[in-house]
Image: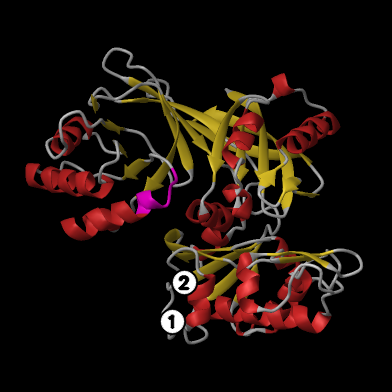
Amino acid sequence: MSEKLCSVGLDVGTTTTQLVVSELEIQNQAGSFSVPQMQITARNIRYQSPVYFTPLVSQDLVDGQAIRDIVLREYEKAGIRREDVDTGAVIITGETSRKENAASVVSALAELAGDFVVATAGPDLESVLAAKGAGAVEYSKSCDLPVLHMDIGGGTSNLALIREGQIFATGCLNVGGRLVKFDKDRKIYYVSPVAEKLCKLKVGDSITKEQAVALAESLVQALEMAAGQREKGPLLQVLTTQGTAMIPPEENVVVSFSGGVADCIREEFTWDSFGDIGPVLGQQIAKSRLCQGNFRLGEQTIRATVIGAGCHSAQLSGSTVFYKAVDFPLKNRPVVQLTDREQVLPEEELAERISEKLAMLDTVGVLSLPGFSAPDYERVKALGRAIARGFGEKPVLVAVEQDMAKALGQAIALQLPEGRSCLCIDRVQLQSGSFLDVAMPVGPCLPVVVKTLIFEK
């Protein structure tokens, strides 16, 4: 028996804000006497809003009321009421995520309806979301070369290196189409601090096409450096916000693009069409080394980061759970996932890899791992030590697919100081980009809800 949910996705980005309404059909894929495993079996987009410029009160403040008004107006156009919405995701991204009131804005939006996943996406999470939303992760599964996905927006370019469907590294450059803004008379009214380091343009100047091209050429050179297609230099350091030296110069990659600027790679716009350098940046990318070899445009471009929203997948963790000093319930905990290959790394390397993955999140996250079939005691102890070290001083939240949570949880707890919270659950399948809720214990079990961001394939 299937159930239909009304799902809303809202992306508030540096340049644009947009909303998507979807109908999700979910079914229990488990047998009659098994733990329920709810999966999405169909997804239909019911409504897509126009793409709005993200309203700002000032360069440092998002206009929360204006965004709220946009959402309510689009609800009306879509023919839905707030009480009709079952679930959804509010993602605030790019430079907007660093505005002074970003957190309060996204929280206010989440109260509009449903049990929303709410995330102020840092550059690492945004890189993951964009790579999945643009279809780059799915594409990499059938590609013999690694894929470097670049989501180029208004203020930042979020990068993800993908091999065989797994994201191995992320990075972020201050490269975007809205680093300089100008009015219809081409008079500049905003120059980002990053652009100030690369050009002599300033507020009040009249910008020319030649000046816009010169700035765009510098930005494209940094992207080429990040892709290993140009020798890395000081320019890359100026523009890097996160560790981005990912691709060795000799390695061939397929470069994949999404974001608003990606539309300017394949479509002809006049250089001053949008009052920013986006069209020129896209045109320079099209002429660059990035597009001379293997490259692709994402199946989604400007809508890549979030085109759908969270589906609730209810499960019940097995009776072999372990928890200590946990303040239930846990809500909207983001998930990072270890691969089969990663979980068999040597202990020190595994701890470092876990730490790197958790650092991608801006809040306390959940580590998901496949787990071992019938592991011996030494293997469980080594895994427990690596996990405890990888979490550092953070509360430890672990989910494993195999039935080993109690033994692993005890091994982790032995490595933690008194009072540090630790939760280990099993028989739960999670993926990076999902969010986990864990309710109060019911007898020996823990009810859990998995919320998965849904993307186009």
Colour style of the rendered protein structure: secondary structure
Percent across and percent down for residue 161 are: 47, 66
User: Residue sitting at 68 percent across and 34 percent down?
Assistant: 8
Q: Secondary structure at mark 1?
A: loop
Does the CB distance between marks 1 and 2 fall below 8 Å?
yes
Q: Quadrant of the N terminus?
A: top right
Residue at 47% x, 37% y: name it.
Answer: 435
For the image shown, how many numbered marks are present on the structure?
2
**Side (left or right) of 89 relative to 229:** right
Residue 136 in the figure: left or right of residue 375? right
Q: Is residue 304 magenta?
A: no
Range drawn in magenta? 357-362
Q: Secondary structure at mark 2?
A: loop
| Circle nearer the N terminus (1, 2) | 2
The residue lying furthest to the right in this view is 185
Q: CA distance from mark 1 to mark 2?
A: 9 Å
Three-letter code for the amino acid on which mark 2 is drawn: Pro
Which residue is more in the foreground, 53 or 203? 203
Q: Which residue is mark 2?
A: 146
- Pointer 1 residue: 251
Residue 372 seen anywhere in this rendered image of the structure: no
Q: Quadrant for residue 324, please give it.
A: top left
In the figure, is residue 85 to the left or right of 353? Answer: right
- Residue 359, magenta (yes or no): yes
